[in-house]
């Protein structure tokens, strides 16, 4: 059974940093496209950053709103995908989710972790 678990969220002041982790059990994240999404109150869930599978080259993509501030990476030994976030702003406040996509029919979400940025 595949399980994803996010961690690393919390309360931080504007300008601060956090590193989110997405740990997997029951699968290897290296064979999946892994994305970090976020959902703020009253808003739709949006893709923040994604890293493609190793066989697809591990390419990274970012939403324009986080380019230059967020970095997604994968540690194959730890079987974890990270989202390093710097220069956080109140608009980054949201629940952050990771998603591992193996195929059109086979993808999984974690339960999410709350990030709150105070001004």
Image (cartoon, rainbow, N blue to C red):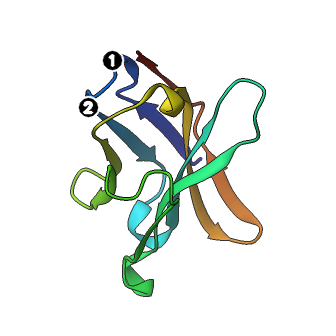
Query: Which residue is painted at 35% across and 39% down in the image?
Result: 21
The answer to the question of whether label 2 and label 1 lie on touching residues, with beta carbons closer than 8 A, is: yes
The residue under label 1 is 12
In this picture, residue 106 sits left or right of residue 51: right
Residue 8 point in image, percent of width and height: 34, 27
Residue lying at the far front of the rendered structure: 119
Quick one: SS at disc 2? Answer: loop
Query: Which residue is painted at 33% across and 48% down in the image?
Result: 82
Q: Which quadrant of the figure has residue 45?
A: top right
User: Would you place residue 49 above or below residue 15 in this image?
Assistant: below
Query: Which residue is painted at 24% across and 50% down in the image?
Result: 78
Residue 65 point in image, percent of width and height: 50, 52
Q: Which mark is residue 87?
A: none
Q: Residues within 10 Å of mark 1 (few under 14, many from 20)?
A: some
The residue under label 2 is 17
Task: Using the numbered discs, state the Cα–Cα distance from disc 2 to disc 1 in whole angstroms.
Answer: 7 Å
Query: Which residue is painted at 34% across and 23% down in the image?
Result: 14
Residue lying at the far left of the rendered structure: 77
Camera-side residue of 48 and 90: 90
Residue 55 point in image, percent of width and height: 41, 85
User: Would you place residue 104 above or below residue 92 in this image?
Assistant: below
User: Would you place residue 93 above or below residue 76 in this image?
Assistant: above
Q: Residues within 10 Å of mark 2 (few under 14, many from 20)?
A: some
Q: Of the residues under marks 2 and 1, which one precedes in the sequence?
A: 1
Quarter of the image that includes the C terminus: top left
Quick one: SS at disc 1? Answer: strand
């Amino acid at each position: 059974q595949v399980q994803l678990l996010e961690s690393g969220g919390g309360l931080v002041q504007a300008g601060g940093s956090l590193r989110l982790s997405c740990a997997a059990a029951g699968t290897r994240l290296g064979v999946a496209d892994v994305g970090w999404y976020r959902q703020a109150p009253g808003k739709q869930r949006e893709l923040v950053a994604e890293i493609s599978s190793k066989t697809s080259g591990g390419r990274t993509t970012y939403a324009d709103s986080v380019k230059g501030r967020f970095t997604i990476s994968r540690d194959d030994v730890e079987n974890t995908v990270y989202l390093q976030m710097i220069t956080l702003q109140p608009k980054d406040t949201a629940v952050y989710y990771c998603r591992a996509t193996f195929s059109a029919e086979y993808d999984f979400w974690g339960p999410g972790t709350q990030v709150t940025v105070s001004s």
